[in-house]
Amino acid sequence: MIRGLVQGVGFRPFVYRTAAKYGLKGEVNNRTDGVAVIVRGDPATVEDFSNHLLAHAPYAADIKSIEVATVPLRDFDSFSITRSINIDDQITEVSPDIAVCPDCLNEMDHDPRRKEYPFINCTNCGPRFSIIESLPYDRSRTSMKPFMMCPACQGEYNEISDRRFHAQPVACDSCGPRYTFRNGMKVLNDLNSILRETAALVHEGKTVALKGTGGYHLLCDALNEEAVRMLRKKKQRESRPFAVMFRDAGCLREYCLLDPEESAELTSWRRPIMILSQRKQLAPSVSNGLNTTGAMLPYMPFHYQLFRMLETPAIVLTSGNISDEPIITDDDTAATELGGIADALISYNRKIVNRCDDSVVRIIDHRPALIRRSRGYVPRPVDLQADAGNILALGAEQKNTFCLGKGTMAILSQYIGDVRNLATYEFMKESLGRFSQLFRFTPEAIACDLHPDYLSTRLASEMSRELGIPLFRIQHHHAHIASCMAENRLDEPVIGISFDGTGYGADGTIWGGEFLIASLGDFTRYTYLDPVALPGGDAAVREPWRTAFSYLYKYFGNNFDFMSLPVFNQAGSEKLKLLADMLDKNINSPLSSGAGRLFDAVSALLGLCTIEKFDSEAPLRLESAIVKKTGEYYPYTAGGQVVFREMFMLWP
Ligand SMILES: [Zn+2]
Ligand SMILES: [Zn+2]
């Protein structure tokens, strides 16, 4: 029995080929809990066979264990792939999109049949989730459907010993998808011309829109400050850092610090964006003063081909979307929406069925922490210890993802985004439909946030009424802690600390610096960060200097010499008086225990960020300003609440 990530990644054909190599008879099949292999042969050969499986497993497989047992003797004529034992098996068959594998890259360079073919793929690599419409996963239910396989591809597809056996997106230059380049009236269809022209544009500091695996990207030279600034201006995204794709790991190391864990995740077939410490600066506008770079490596064949033509070792590769809208996937929308931003548009004639942003990962304490779980990870389920029945969880409002509970699996959606944006809200509903269909899911209960006004909460109430199933409203930070418990397979009560910006509290106030004694089903609020009033409500979240003022005013009133600090001097005494008035009279000044607000206040007091240009800028700049971490801490008093009066007394 082989357990781990072994389904939907070409594992069974691999076992078949390995058995053939060792001359073993027997069978292989998928089960709910892994892949079962039965072989008949002498012990030494079986051991060699087993070692070979471990050492040469497919690119996207991740073997956690091989358990060997003796079974009653059976007669086998040959080695065969038998039908899956459990119907549940189909659930795990949707693989995430997999970066092009080393074998295909090698073939792209040398094999005449697919030389320089930019949609090269095999059983071990290529698009999966992004092209699938429904199950079972075969070509006619993917966006490869319009592409009739040529006899050569068909032969490979049918031949079990071929590394393209049952590779649904299999294609070649004579039968598969192709790229098209458009720049005004100029249309190119020849790959070499497209690459040359694109490289020339990048070299000139222009912006190019490129259709990726799960949506469009905008790209430009990451070393050309003028180009990056122009892209920012056109994208109307003033300050948020851009992700960067490097030519290869060597180039990346020149600009970023990389430890072994970071390197492993970065080069994995998932190819996420990794948040890395900077070693050397790219164009300053890429990170805009932060000391980290969101770095990734090529993952589509086209990326590799483009870098061969490019002089620059790094390109900005940012989502092709307009402000809070979802990443664009279809060519018409790209032409109208990105036409004004990009100097050229590179598309290909295969539809992106499931939109999927690049994933973002940071290594924390030697382990990958997912900041945005999307391409390369979705729709792989998270294994649970508990039975989640058939619960649909709709999540919160900003940075939304939803989750299907299916038995002992939690199947999370791709990153959805801020559902207050209509297009994003539609995307959530569309994706919910797709996931329900793919995973044969019918909810028996719905969970949503406790916040009454979240659009996800409203949708949950509507669905619960329509379907006549129960609705559970979950406190935001309890949900955070319970998810963390599930991910780490904890089921005993825990002390859970949830440091967050905002979440609707059980008492109707804004929570976000919470110390909960929590189990999976329940919690008590043990203590929390001393709540501070946010003068102006949401305006205080966007303008951290207001929260800074509120903290000092709360602790010291008019005894504090506000004008001695540049942040308040800049705001002016008029505004301060207005704020003091709002606080005194409790006008539009909701209380918040959010840890994000404390970070906002400190960041503003240090002059790092007084007014945010993008979400979470103040805490990010504060984190970026940390030169050295020590075990020391600022004074505070803990009791019913964690109070920072003494810490603020140290100012300045
Ligand atoms: Zn491959
Ligand atoms: Zn072909």
Image (cartoon, rainbow, N blue to C red):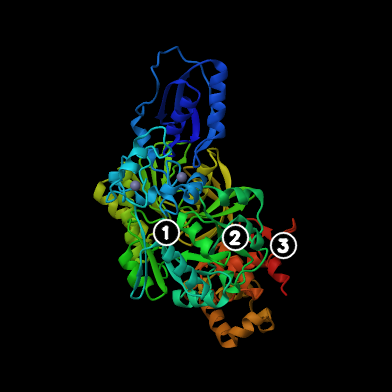
Please say if 275 is above or below 479.
below
The residue labelled by disc 1 is 212
Residue 100's x, y, as percent?
47, 49
C-alpha separation, residue under disc 3 versus residue under disc 1: 47 Å
Closer to the camera, 80 or 404? 80
Residue in view at x 47 percent, y 39 percent? 383
The residue labelled by disc 2 is 529
- Ligand 1 within 8 Å of disc 1? The answer is no
Label 2 vs 1, first from the N-terminus:
1
Q: Which mark is residue 292?
A: none
Q: Which mark is residue 634?
A: 3
Q: Nearer the viewer, mark 2 or mark 3?
A: 3
Residue 388 seen: yes
Q: Callout 1, which amino acid?
A: Gly
Residue in view at x 63 percent, y 73 percent? 608
Residue 151's x, y, as percent?
30, 42
The secondary structure type at the circle numbered 3 is loop
> Left or right: where does residue 245 sit relative to residue 564?
left
Q: Quadrant of the C terminus?
A: bottom right
What is the residue that sits farthest to the front in this orientation? 112
Q: Callout 2, which amino acid?
A: Leu
